[in-house]
Image: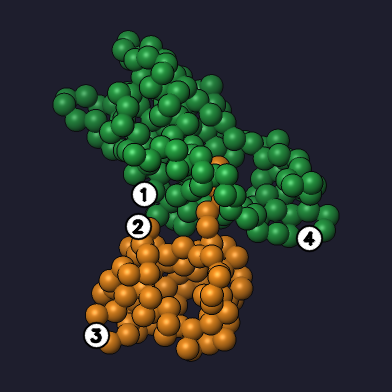
Amino acid sequence: MTLPLGRGTSRQPITIRVQTEDFDAGRELEALTGGRRDVGAVASFIGLVRDLNDGREIRTMMLEHYPGMTEKALTGICREAHARWNILETLVIHRVGALAPGDRIVLVGVSGGHRGEAFQACEFIMDYLKTRAPFWKKESTPQGEKWVDARDSDDAAAGRWKG
Amino acid sequence: MVTLLYFASLRETLGCSREQVALPPGSPTVSMLIDRLRDRDPKWSDAFGPGKRFRVAVNQDMADLSTPLKPGDEIAFFPPVTGG
Protein backbone atom coordinates (compact mmCIF):
# COMPACT_ATOMS: atom_id res chain seq x y z
CA MET A 1 0.00 0.00 0.00
CA THR A 2 1.41 3.39 -0.95
CA LEU A 3 0.12 6.89 -0.38
CA PRO A 4 0.55 9.92 -2.62
CA LEU A 5 3.14 12.46 -1.58
CA GLY A 6 1.31 15.26 -3.36
CA ARG A 7 2.65 18.59 -4.56
CA GLY A 8 3.40 17.42 -8.08
CA THR A 9 5.82 14.61 -7.28
CA SER A 10 5.22 10.95 -8.01
CA ARG A 11 7.20 9.61 -5.05
CA GLN A 12 5.32 7.75 -2.32
CA PRO A 13 6.35 8.65 1.25
CA ILE A 14 5.01 5.43 2.81
CA THR A 15 5.48 1.94 1.41
CA ILE A 16 3.92 -1.05 3.22
CA ARG A 17 4.15 -4.66 2.07
CA VAL A 18 3.00 -7.84 3.81
CA GLN A 19 4.23 -10.86 1.89
CA THR A 20 5.28 -14.51 2.14
CA GLU A 21 8.38 -14.03 -0.03
CA ASP A 22 11.80 -13.01 1.24
CA PHE A 23 13.11 -9.51 0.48
CA ASP A 24 16.43 -8.11 -0.71
CA ALA A 25 17.20 -5.46 1.90
CA GLY A 26 19.90 -3.80 -0.21
CA ARG A 27 17.63 -3.40 -3.18
CA GLU A 28 14.72 -2.18 -1.06
CA LEU A 29 16.83 0.46 0.68
CA GLU A 30 18.29 1.57 -2.63
CA ALA A 31 14.76 2.01 -3.98
CA LEU A 32 13.97 4.13 -0.91
CA THR A 33 16.56 6.71 -1.92
CA GLY A 34 16.91 6.15 -5.67
CA GLY A 35 16.49 9.31 -7.73
CA ARG A 36 16.53 11.63 -4.71
CA ARG A 37 19.26 14.12 -3.89
CA ASP A 38 17.84 15.37 -0.59
CA VAL A 39 18.53 12.19 1.43
CA GLY A 40 21.38 12.51 3.91
CA ALA A 41 20.62 9.43 6.01
CA VAL A 42 18.92 6.05 5.81
CA ALA A 43 18.25 4.14 9.04
CA SER A 44 17.10 0.54 8.79
CA PHE A 45 16.19 -2.43 10.95
CA ILE A 46 16.02 -6.11 9.97
CA GLY A 47 14.39 -8.67 12.26
CA LEU A 48 15.22 -12.37 11.89
CA VAL A 49 14.00 -15.68 13.32
CA ARG A 50 16.29 -16.80 16.18
CA ASP A 51 17.14 -20.47 16.71
CA LEU A 52 16.33 -20.29 20.44
CA ASN A 53 13.40 -18.57 22.18
CA ASP A 54 13.41 -18.65 26.01
CA GLY A 55 15.55 -21.78 25.81
CA ARG A 56 13.32 -23.62 23.33
CA GLU A 57 14.79 -24.85 20.05
CA ILE A 58 12.83 -23.33 17.18
CA ARG A 59 12.26 -25.48 14.12
CA THR A 60 9.77 -23.26 12.31
CA MET A 61 7.95 -20.03 13.07
CA MET A 62 4.49 -19.50 11.60
CA LEU A 63 3.42 -15.89 11.23
CA GLU A 64 -0.27 -15.01 10.98
CA HIS A 65 -1.78 -11.59 10.27
CA TYR A 66 -5.15 -9.86 9.87
CA PRO A 67 -5.32 -8.97 6.16
CA GLY A 68 -6.50 -5.40 5.76
CA MET A 69 -6.05 -4.27 9.35
CA THR A 70 -2.35 -5.13 9.38
CA GLU A 71 -1.63 -2.89 6.38
CA LYS A 72 -3.87 -0.17 7.85
CA ALA A 73 -2.10 -0.32 11.22
CA LEU A 74 1.38 -0.19 9.63
CA THR A 75 0.36 2.76 7.46
CA GLY A 76 -0.96 4.56 10.55
CA ILE A 77 2.31 3.93 12.43
CA CYS A 78 4.36 5.33 9.53
CA ARG A 79 2.03 8.34 9.24
CA GLU A 80 2.63 9.04 12.92
CA ALA A 81 6.39 8.81 12.37
CA HIS A 82 6.12 11.34 9.53
CA ALA A 83 4.11 13.64 11.83
CA ARG A 84 6.65 13.40 14.67
CA TRP A 85 9.93 13.66 12.78
CA ASN A 86 11.22 15.53 9.75
CA ILE A 87 11.83 12.48 7.58
CA LEU A 88 11.38 11.82 3.87
CA GLU A 89 10.20 8.26 3.26
CA THR A 90 9.31 5.17 5.30
CA LEU A 91 9.23 1.52 4.27
CA VAL A 92 7.93 -1.54 6.13
CA ILE A 93 8.09 -5.05 4.67
CA HIS A 94 6.81 -7.83 6.95
CA ARG A 95 6.72 -11.50 6.04
CA VAL A 96 3.97 -13.98 6.96
CA GLY A 97 3.68 -17.77 6.65
CA ALA A 98 6.21 -20.42 7.62
CA LEU A 99 9.75 -19.19 8.44
CA ALA A 100 12.87 -20.95 9.74
CA PRO A 101 15.74 -19.81 12.01
CA GLY A 102 17.91 -17.33 10.11
CA ASP A 103 15.06 -16.17 7.88
CA ARG A 104 14.34 -12.46 7.67
CA ILE A 105 10.97 -11.43 9.15
CA VAL A 106 10.79 -7.66 8.87
CA LEU A 107 12.52 -4.70 7.25
CA VAL A 108 11.98 -1.10 8.35
CA GLY A 109 13.69 1.68 6.41
CA VAL A 110 13.55 5.43 7.02
CA SER A 111 15.17 8.10 4.87
CA GLY A 112 15.72 11.66 5.99
CA GLY A 113 17.94 14.66 5.72
CA HIS A 114 19.90 13.82 8.87
CA ARG A 115 20.63 10.68 10.88
CA GLY A 116 19.14 11.66 14.24
CA GLU A 117 15.54 11.83 13.09
CA ALA A 118 15.91 8.79 10.80
CA PHE A 119 17.28 6.68 13.70
CA GLN A 120 14.51 7.74 16.06
CA ALA A 121 11.72 7.24 13.52
CA CYS A 122 13.03 3.77 12.65
CA GLU A 123 13.07 2.69 16.29
CA PHE A 124 9.63 4.20 16.88
CA ILE A 125 8.12 2.33 13.91
CA MET A 126 9.59 -0.95 15.15
CA ASP A 127 8.43 -0.41 18.77
CA TYR A 128 4.90 0.42 17.64
CA LEU A 129 4.83 -2.46 15.13
CA LYS A 130 5.65 -4.88 17.98
CA THR A 131 2.72 -3.70 20.09
CA ARG A 132 0.08 -2.45 17.62
CA ALA A 133 0.28 -4.26 14.29
CA PRO A 134 -1.81 -7.46 14.19
CA PHE A 135 0.75 -10.22 13.65
CA TRP A 136 1.03 -13.40 15.73
CA LYS A 137 3.87 -15.93 15.91
CA LYS A 138 3.47 -19.64 16.55
CA GLU A 139 6.69 -21.53 17.15
CA SER A 140 7.24 -25.20 16.41
CA THR A 141 9.81 -26.89 18.70
CA PRO A 142 10.76 -30.53 19.41
CA GLN A 143 8.28 -30.31 22.32
CA GLY A 144 5.39 -29.22 20.07
CA GLU A 145 3.71 -26.04 18.90
CA LYS A 146 3.26 -22.93 21.01
CA TRP A 147 1.85 -19.46 20.39
CA VAL A 148 4.43 -16.86 21.36
CA ASP A 149 3.38 -14.72 24.36
CA ALA A 150 3.46 -10.93 24.13
CA ARG A 151 6.31 -9.42 26.15
CA ASP A 152 5.85 -6.70 28.77
CA SER A 153 9.24 -5.31 27.67
CA ASP A 154 7.73 -4.55 24.24
CA ASP A 155 4.93 -2.54 25.90
CA ALA A 156 7.57 -0.66 27.88
CA ALA A 157 9.57 0.05 24.72
CA ALA A 158 6.49 1.45 22.95
CA GLY A 159 5.50 3.40 26.07
CA ARG A 160 8.63 5.56 26.04
CA TRP A 161 7.42 7.37 22.88
CA LYS A 162 4.31 8.70 24.62
CA GLY A 163 3.94 12.36 25.55
CA MET B 1 -25.95 -8.49 11.97
CA VAL B 2 -22.21 -8.04 12.50
CA THR B 3 -19.23 -10.12 11.40
CA LEU B 4 -16.93 -11.52 14.09
CA LEU B 5 -13.37 -12.60 13.30
CA TYR B 6 -11.04 -14.58 15.56
CA PHE B 7 -7.28 -14.84 15.12
CA ALA B 8 -4.31 -16.89 16.31
CA SER B 9 -4.66 -18.78 19.62
CA LEU B 10 -8.18 -17.43 20.13
CA ARG B 11 -9.29 -18.89 16.79
CA GLU B 12 -7.83 -22.28 17.75
CA THR B 13 -9.32 -22.25 21.26
CA LEU B 14 -12.79 -21.41 19.95
CA GLY B 15 -12.54 -23.54 16.80
CA CYS B 16 -13.99 -20.61 14.83
CA SER B 17 -12.42 -18.05 12.50
CA ARG B 18 -15.51 -16.14 11.37
CA GLU B 19 -19.19 -15.91 12.22
CA GLN B 20 -22.15 -13.61 11.86
CA VAL B 21 -24.24 -12.72 14.89
CA ALA B 22 -27.07 -10.35 15.75
CA LEU B 23 -26.22 -7.32 17.87
CA PRO B 24 -27.68 -7.02 21.37
CA PRO B 25 -30.69 -4.63 21.42
CA GLY B 26 -30.46 -1.00 22.47
CA SER B 27 -27.13 0.82 22.18
CA PRO B 28 -24.76 -2.13 21.90
CA THR B 29 -21.09 -1.94 22.84
CA VAL B 30 -18.21 -4.41 22.59
CA SER B 31 -18.74 -5.25 26.26
CA MET B 32 -22.43 -6.11 25.69
CA LEU B 33 -21.54 -8.27 22.69
CA ILE B 34 -18.95 -10.19 24.73
CA ASP B 35 -21.49 -10.76 27.54
CA ARG B 36 -23.88 -12.25 25.00
CA LEU B 37 -21.19 -14.49 23.48
CA ARG B 38 -20.15 -15.70 26.94
CA ASP B 39 -23.78 -16.58 27.80
CA ARG B 40 -24.06 -18.52 24.54
CA ASP B 41 -21.23 -21.01 24.88
CA PRO B 42 -18.87 -22.22 27.65
CA LYS B 43 -15.87 -21.99 25.30
CA TRP B 44 -16.54 -18.27 24.77
CA SER B 45 -17.29 -17.83 28.47
CA ASP B 46 -13.86 -19.22 29.29
CA ALA B 47 -11.91 -17.46 26.50
CA PHE B 48 -13.32 -14.04 27.48
CA GLY B 49 -13.45 -14.77 31.21
CA PRO B 50 -11.79 -12.89 34.08
CA GLY B 51 -8.06 -12.43 33.70
CA LYS B 52 -7.98 -13.45 30.04
CA ARG B 53 -5.90 -11.11 27.86
CA PHE B 54 -7.37 -10.27 24.49
CA ARG B 55 -7.63 -7.32 22.12
CA VAL B 56 -10.56 -6.13 20.04
CA ALA B 57 -10.71 -4.17 16.79
CA VAL B 58 -13.81 -2.64 15.22
CA ASN B 59 -13.70 -2.08 11.46
CA GLN B 60 -9.93 -2.70 11.55
CA ASP B 61 -9.15 -0.05 14.19
CA MET B 62 -8.14 -0.93 17.74
CA ALA B 63 -11.14 -0.61 20.06
CA ASP B 64 -12.04 -1.27 23.70
CA LEU B 65 -14.92 -2.60 25.75
CA SER B 66 -16.86 0.67 25.58
CA THR B 67 -16.67 1.05 21.77
CA PRO B 68 -20.22 1.33 20.32
CA LEU B 69 -21.31 -1.15 17.63
CA LYS B 70 -23.67 -0.83 14.68
CA PRO B 71 -25.05 -3.28 12.10
CA GLY B 72 -22.51 -4.24 9.45
CA ASP B 73 -19.47 -3.73 11.69
CA GLU B 74 -16.48 -6.09 11.45
CA ILE B 75 -15.38 -6.97 14.99
CA ALA B 76 -12.12 -8.88 15.46
CA PHE B 77 -10.89 -10.57 18.62
CA PHE B 78 -7.28 -11.63 19.03
CA PRO B 79 -4.50 -12.14 21.57
CA PRO B 80 -1.88 -9.42 22.24
CA VAL B 81 0.22 -9.07 19.08
CA THR B 82 3.68 -10.64 18.65
CA GLY B 83 4.99 -9.54 15.25
CA GLY B 84 8.34 -8.10 14.26
Label ID, residue B26:
3
Q: Which residue is mark 1?
A: A72
Element class at badge 3: loop
Rendered position, A121 above or below A155: above
Q: Residues within 10 Å of mark 1 (few under 14, many from 20)?
A: some
Q: Amino acid at mark 3?
A: Gly
Q: Nearer the viewer, mark 2 or mark 3?
A: 3
The span from disc 4 to disc 3 (Cα, nearest Å) is 46 Å
**Colour convention of the picture:** by chain
Residue A64 makes an appearance in the image: yes
Question: Do tag 4 and tag 3 residues touch (Cβ < 8 Å)?
Answer: no
| Residues marked 1 and 2 touching at CB (< 8 Å) | yes
* Element assignment for label 1: helix
For this view, does B72 lie left or right of residue B65? left
Tell me which label, 2 or 3, sits earlier in the chain.
3
Of all chains, the one bearing label 4 is A
Tag 4: amino acid: Gly
